[in-house]
Image: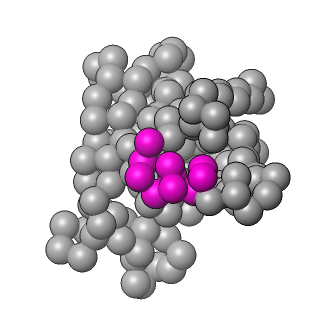
Amino acid sequence: MHRLDKDTSGIVLMSHNRKAHAFVATQFEARTTQKSYVAEVWGRIEGEEGLIDLPLAIDPDNKPRHHVDFEQGKSAQTRWQVIERRVNTTRVRLFPLTGRTHQLRVHMKALGHVILGDEFYADGEALSAASRLLLHAEQLTFRRPDSSDVTFTSPVPF
């Protein structure tokens, strides 16, 4: 029904049949589903919440990486909210309003706070601070064919 980056943990939605797939797929396309992720990022983020509105495109010189591109990029928005500040890191909840490849990873890098353990976008201490990408698909809400909303959650493993 949707995709997660290979190293992202958490909820993956699969359909039981074609009718259900079509019904929910239109919600992903229309951006009416609600998704939240939790990430541990390098550094201490200032402020409590915000909106990142930066266009993204594949980086032609570093495929499959993506980057902010104001000329060729596609619109991408992510809301963020601080959960907890630690000594060298910040735990944030991320709400993608669009669904671009590597969106959360590139948007956090653009803020100057890469996700820990991110082999594509982190380096140095931020890369070595975790043995895996600390990005988790925590919650997904969508409408069922009977018009009721359903929410799935997955506990954060880090």
Q: Which quadrant holds residue 44?
A: top left
Q: Relative to 86, is 134 above or below?
A: below
The structure residue drawn at horizontal position 63% and vertical position 41%, both measured from the top left corner, is 145
**Picture quarter with the N terminus:** bottom right
> Can I make out residue 108 in this image?
no
At 51% from the left and 56% from the top, the residue drawn is 26
In the rendered view, tell whether residue 56 sits above or below residue 117: below
Outermost residue on the left side: it is 71
Q: Residue 86, percent across and down?
A: 53, 17
Q: Position of residue 60 (x, y in %)?
A: 40, 84
Q: Which residues are magenta?
A: 23-32
| Residue 83 visible, this angle | yes
Residue 90 appears left or right of 20 = left
Q: How many marks?
A: 0
* Residue at image location 33% in from the left, 17% down from the top: 48
Residue drawn at (43%, 20%) of the image: 82
Q: Is residue 91 magenta?
A: no
Along the horizontal axis of the image, is 119 left or right of 53?
Answer: right
Please, what is the dominant secondary structure of the magenta stretch? Answer: helix
Q: Where is residue 39 shown, x and y percent of the image?
A: 56, 34
Residue 127 image offset from top left, x and y in percent: 60, 49
Type of colouring: one colour
Quadrant of the rendered image containing residue 158: top right
Q: In front here: 89 or 36? A: 36
